[in-house]
Each structure stands twice: as structure tokens, then as C-alpha cells.
Amino acid sequence: MITLQTISILLELLVVFVALGIAFSKKQLAGYGLAITFGIYIYYDSVKFYNQPVDETTLQILFFVATLSALLSVLSIYKKL
């Protein structure tokens, strides 16, 4: 059965591919940052969804890295506006 969480993970994967497309084709660092952010979100959500035994501190650090990556990405986009 496909759950809302599964759909969310698939949409996050789509965001990763689009962000990588932006990074490679447009040479935009923000694309790499967003790909990193959503890649971490996929991992985080998958660990939670499948109840994988991953240390909570590791997940917190990864979530912090994802947030920092997203912030740097949007700041990069903002500078170009």
C-alpha cells in the first residue's frame, strides 16, 4: 500500500533530480545544495519510515547539515536576484 509518507519520499527524490539538473546544466551551486538537502531528507524519512536502528545524534547532525545546506542554497539564489 502506498502511504502519504511513501509519496513524500518519492517527491523528495524528484526534487533531488531536478536540483541536480539545475546544478549540472545551469552550473548553479544552489542546485547542489538543494540536492544535498533533499537527499538527506530522503535518508531521514526512510530511516523513520522503516524503523531503522540509526543513532538519534547522527540523525540530528544530518538534519542540521540539511538545514544549513538549504539556507546556503536560498542565500545563493537571493544574491542572484
Image (cartoon, rainbow, N blue to C red):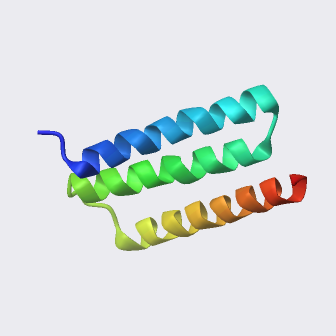
Work out which residue is located at the far left of the displayed protein and give it: 1
Instruction: Tell me: residue 13, above or below residue 53.
Output: above
Report x, y in % for residue 2. Answer: 17, 40
Considering depth in this image, is 8 or 60 the residue closer to the camera? 8
Q: In this view, does 16 lie above or below 34?
A: above
Tell which of 79 and 72 is nearer to you. Answer: 79
Can you see residue 52?
no
Image quadrant occupied by the N terminus: top left
Residue 81 screen position, x and y as percent: 87, 54
Residue for point 82% across, 59% down: 78
Q: Is residue 76 left or right of residue 55?
A: right
* Residue drawn at x 59%, y 66% as measured from the top left: 67
Res 77 → quadrant = bottom right
Left or right relative to 16: residue 22: right
Q: In this view, does 48 lie above or below 19?
A: below
- Report how many numbered discs are placed on residues in the image: 0
Decide if residue 23 is on the left or right side of residue 53: right
Q: Residue furthest right?
A: 80
Measured as percent of width and height from the top left, residue 37 is found at 57, 53
Q: In this view, does 35 lie to the left or right of 22?
A: left
Query: Horizontal and vertical percent for residue 38?
Result: 52, 50
Query: Farthest front residue?
Result: 81
Residue at 72% in and 56% down: 73
Q: Which residue is drawn at 73% across and 35% down?
A: 23
Q: Can residue 16 be seen in this view?
A: yes
